[in-house]
Image (spheres, rainbow, N blue to C red):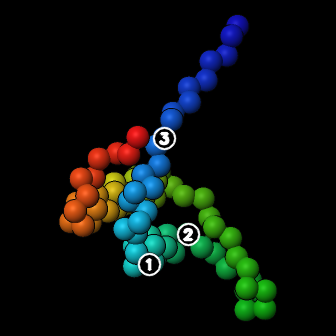
Amino acid sequence: MVERHIVWLMKLRLDLLEHLTAADVLQEAAANQHRYKAEPTFSKTGRGHLSPRSIKDSAKEAERSQALTRKLTARLKKNGKNGAHPS
């Protein structure tokens, strides 16, 4: 029996990264804050861990990602670029 694997290619929109702000990053970090769990000795070690995400968390992350892409594309267009995918 031959195993087959599907690989999904993803094109990074580096042109959109130019329009990413610190506020955008902070908003995403805040949206995931509930998943961070401090160790009992957090005040001494400064360490913790990230709990696994639920299906609900994954769905919300996908929605936020799509919304951010739309927001960044709008910023790109506002700054006089066409927003087309670079080749």
Report, in whole angstroms, how far the alpha carbon at label 2 lies from the one at label 3. Answer: 26 Å
Q: Residue furthest bottom?
A: 43
The quarter in which the C terminus is drawn is top left
Mark in front: 2 vs 3: 3
Q: Which residue is mark 1?
A: 22
Mark toward the start of the polypeptide (2 vs 1):
1
Q: Which residue is mark 2?
A: 35
Label 2, residues with CA under 10 Å away: few <14, some 14-19, many ≥20 = some
- Which quadrant holds residue 25? bottom left
Residue drawn 51% across the image and 35% down it: 9
* Depth check, front residue: 85 or 60: 85
Q: Position of residue 12 (x, y in %)?
A: 47, 49
Query: Which amino acid type is shown beneath numbered disc 2?
Result: Arg
39 left or right, relative to 87:
right
Label 1, residues with CA under 10 Å away: few <14, some 14-19, many ≥20 = few
Query: Which amino acid type is shown beneath numbered disc 3?
Result: Met
Q: Secondary structure at mark 3?
A: loop
Residue drawn 60% across the image and 59% down it: 52
Residue drawn 28% across the image and 62% down it: 76
Labelled pair 2, 3 in contact (Cβ < 8 Å): no
Q: Position of residue 41 (x, y in %)?
A: 77, 86
Mark toward the start of the polypeptide (2 vs 3):
3
Query: Which amino acid type is shown beneath numbered disc 1?
Result: Ala
